[in-house]
């Protein structure tokens, strides 16, 4: 369309202002010298200093990262298996229920997942003695369960798109099945596995509701610590924490974007070279 | 669709028993940690509250189930109000997301190609930062003494007659705040499916309609809008479903005298220690959500059927 869509562009500008003004405001106020979180009292970095010397925050961060790494890794293994099964195995007993079990957690409200897992853990502890205390293990089990279905969805889409004739060709050329898996299938779906891991890692690191139900005394993750603080109101050190989070995530996403763009460009030029070589 | 012949790789999987492992491990995991806990919720919703630990009991007379909880959903004012408030808040948030997200998605498709990826990344970026911190950012803006509230207050005082003037607008702890923050946090879920369905549209259709003398707004109504219905439904569900069960937003910025379902489930469970009633409300929330989801999957099945026929 040649006409400039003035209306659409102004809505777009409004939308981006809406997305970013609250975050920017929060970042500016993290440098506020005043104890009152919303009244400006001069520039200061004291909240960063007090945040970084806060042992509770650091311990919570370490716990969150541990849970996120372990649960994202397990969720990626289980989710990749499930996604592969859904894309490749058309018929097996219980397939309908299997795909239902992979879809349902995606739309299950977090509160319900939370109370169902808490009741499950309490009843299990009553009947079998396990889990004796709730904490790292129960939170990790819960995180694996709800993030593996996200991984499965991402991997399933990639496996369904992948060209199977390459695998057939490799088999025809005498590759053994496990060689095909290792050298053809796995590299093809690797980007999906990687983005699945990142997704699982992020949602584990971000989760409040399910963690708050499945954790026990002494195991406070970073989101839970923030949650218990912000329920009481706005505090300047949380502003500082939020600013650090936004900067780290922003840099991470930008870096990932650049790497993916480069890889895509390289792939395209490789393809072009291959076509030219064929001519 | 015809079934593709099983590949040799597939046959190898089945012959060596690898398939059983691939299917079995995630299957067992999800049955144990998703299906079983969910069945506990279903069973608990018909149990009776008891002063034991854990606080429930089955039993008494045949048929051993207690449907009084479900009765209370329709007779107790608290639950009726909760469901109405949740549906209204989530409904308003969905409509506002659509009204803001649709022009944004359409605007994105009209941007030069080189800009689009950057702008899309800017839409997704807030999604990667912590959900909790995005809600928290609004707590800073809505509070009485913040620059945002004070700015809006001056605008309000300037607009209305002098005796309506206020020292600050009561933005925090209101349904308004809940809807606003829901729109803020769920808008990307609306924009992305809309963008996906709008980007596929053929721009020559627009031009054809324009050449035939339609005005731009009529082109939008007759050509663009009908073709983007799947995106609207997908985006609407992606916003409505999590918004209806939301717990974090109403707890932080909501009006505690007008609770939403998520809050009630959590309170019944943790504060009141009434597991059966918490489970009953949870089941009711799921039933409320099943309706829209069924409509969506039926619509999608029909759309796929039409696409198959067209082939």
Image: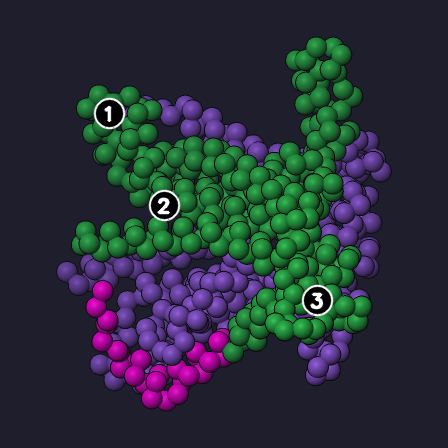
**Which residues are drawn in magenta?**
B1-27
| Magenta residue check for B26 | yes
- Residue visible at 47% across and 26% down in the picture: A10
Would you say A175 lies left or right of A144 here? left
| Magenta residue check for A138 | no
Q: Which of the chains bears the disc numbered 1?
A: B
Would you say B225 lies left or right of B282 here? left
- Which chain identifier belongs to the purple chain? A
Q: Position of residue A117 (x, y in %)?
A: 64, 68
Q: Position of residue B138 (x, y in %)?
A: 67, 38
Q: Position of residue A264 (x, y in %)?
A: 37, 55
Q: Secondary structure at mark 3?
A: strand
Q: Which mark is residue A212?
A: none
Q: Which mark is residue B48?
A: 3
| Residue occupied by mark 2 | B230
- Which chain identifier belongs to the green chain? B
In front of the other: A20 or A121: A121
Please tell me whether residue A216 is drawn above or below residue A94 in the rendered image.
above
For the stretch drawn in magenta, the main secondary structure is helix
In front of the other: A174 or B165: B165
| Same chain check for tags 2 and 3 | yes
Distance from disc 1 to disc 3, alpha carbons, whole Å, reads 66 Å
| Residue occupied by mark 1 | B210
- Residue visible at 65% across and 43% down in the picture: B81
| Same chain check for tags 1 and 3 | yes
Distance from disc 2 to disc 3, alpha carbons, whole Å, reads 43 Å
Please tell me whether residue A1 is drawn above or below residue A251 in the rendered image.
above
């Amino acid at each position: 369309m040649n006409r400039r869509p003035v209306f659409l562009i102004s809505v777009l500008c409004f939308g981006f202002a809406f997305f970013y003004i609250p975050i920017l405001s929060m970042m500016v106020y993290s440098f506020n010298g005043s104890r009152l979180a919303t009244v400006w009292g001069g520039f200061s970095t004291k909240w960063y200093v007090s945040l970084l010397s806060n042992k509770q925050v650091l311990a919570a961060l370490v716990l969150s990262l541990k849970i996120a790494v372990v649960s994202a890794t397990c969720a990626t293994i289980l989710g990749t298996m499930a996604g592969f099964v859904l894309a490749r195995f058309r018929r097996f007993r219980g397939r309908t229920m299997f795909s239902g079990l992979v879809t349902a957690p995606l739309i299950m409200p977090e509160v319900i997942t939370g109370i169902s897992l808490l009741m499950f853990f309490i009843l299990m502890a009553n009947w079998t003695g396990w889990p004796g205390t709730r904490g790292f293990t129960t939170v990790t089990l819960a995180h694996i369960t709800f993030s593996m279905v996200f991984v499965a969805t991402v991997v399933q889409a990639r496996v369904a798109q992948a060209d199977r004739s390459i695998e057939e060709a490799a088999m025809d050329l005498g590759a053994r099945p496990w060689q095909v898996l290792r050298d053809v299938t796995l590299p093809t779906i690797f980007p999906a596995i990687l983005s699945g891991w990142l997704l699982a890692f992020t949602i584990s690191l971000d989760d409040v509701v399910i963690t708050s139900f499945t954790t026990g005394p002494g195991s406070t993750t970073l989101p839970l610590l923030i949650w218990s603080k912000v329920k009481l109101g706005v505090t300047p050190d949380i502003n500082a924490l939020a600013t650090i989070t936004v900067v780290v995530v922003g840099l991470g996403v930008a870096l990932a974007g650049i790497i993916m763009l480069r890889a895509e460009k390289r792939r395209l030029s490789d393809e072009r070279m291959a076509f030219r070589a064929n001519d | 669709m015809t079934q593709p012949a099983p590949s040799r790789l597939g046959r190898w999987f089945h012959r060596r028993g690898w398939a059983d492992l691939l299917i079995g491990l995630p299957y067992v995991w999800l049955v144990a940690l998703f299906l079983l806990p969910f069945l506990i919720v279903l069973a608990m919703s018909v149990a009776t509250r008891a002063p034991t630990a854990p606080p429930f009991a089955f039993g008494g007379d045949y048929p051993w189930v207690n449907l009084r909880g479900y009765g209370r959903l329709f007779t107790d004012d608290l639950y009726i109000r909760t469901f109405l408030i949740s549906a209204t808040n989530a409904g308003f948030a969905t409509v506002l997301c659509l009204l803001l997200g649709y022009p944004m998605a359409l605007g994105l498709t009209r941007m030069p190609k080189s800009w689009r990826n950057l702008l899309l990344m800017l839409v997704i970026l807030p999604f990667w930062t912590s959900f909790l911190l995005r809600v928290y950012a609004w707590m800073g803006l809505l509070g009485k003494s913040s620059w945002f509230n004070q700015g809006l207050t001056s605008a309000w005082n300037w607009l209305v007659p002098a005796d309506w003037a206020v020292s600050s607008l009561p933005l925090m702890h209101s349904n308004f705040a809940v809807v606003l923050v829901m729109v803020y946090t769920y808008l990307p879920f609306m924009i992305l499916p809309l963008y996906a369905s709008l980007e596929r549209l053929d721009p020559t259709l627009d031009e054809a309609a324009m050449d035939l003398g339609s005005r731009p707004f009529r082109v939008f109504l007759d050509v663009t809008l009908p073709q983007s219905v799947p995106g609207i439904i997908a985006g609407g569900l992606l916003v409505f479903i999590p918004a209806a069960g939301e717990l974090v937003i109403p707890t932080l910025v909501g009006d505690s005298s007008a609770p939403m379902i998520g809050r009630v489930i959590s309170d019944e469970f943790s504060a009141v220690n009434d597991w059966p009633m918490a489970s009953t409300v949870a089941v009711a929330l799921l039933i409320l959500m099943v309706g829209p989801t069924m409509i969506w999957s039926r619509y999608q099945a029909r759309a796929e059927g039409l696409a198959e026929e067209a082939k």
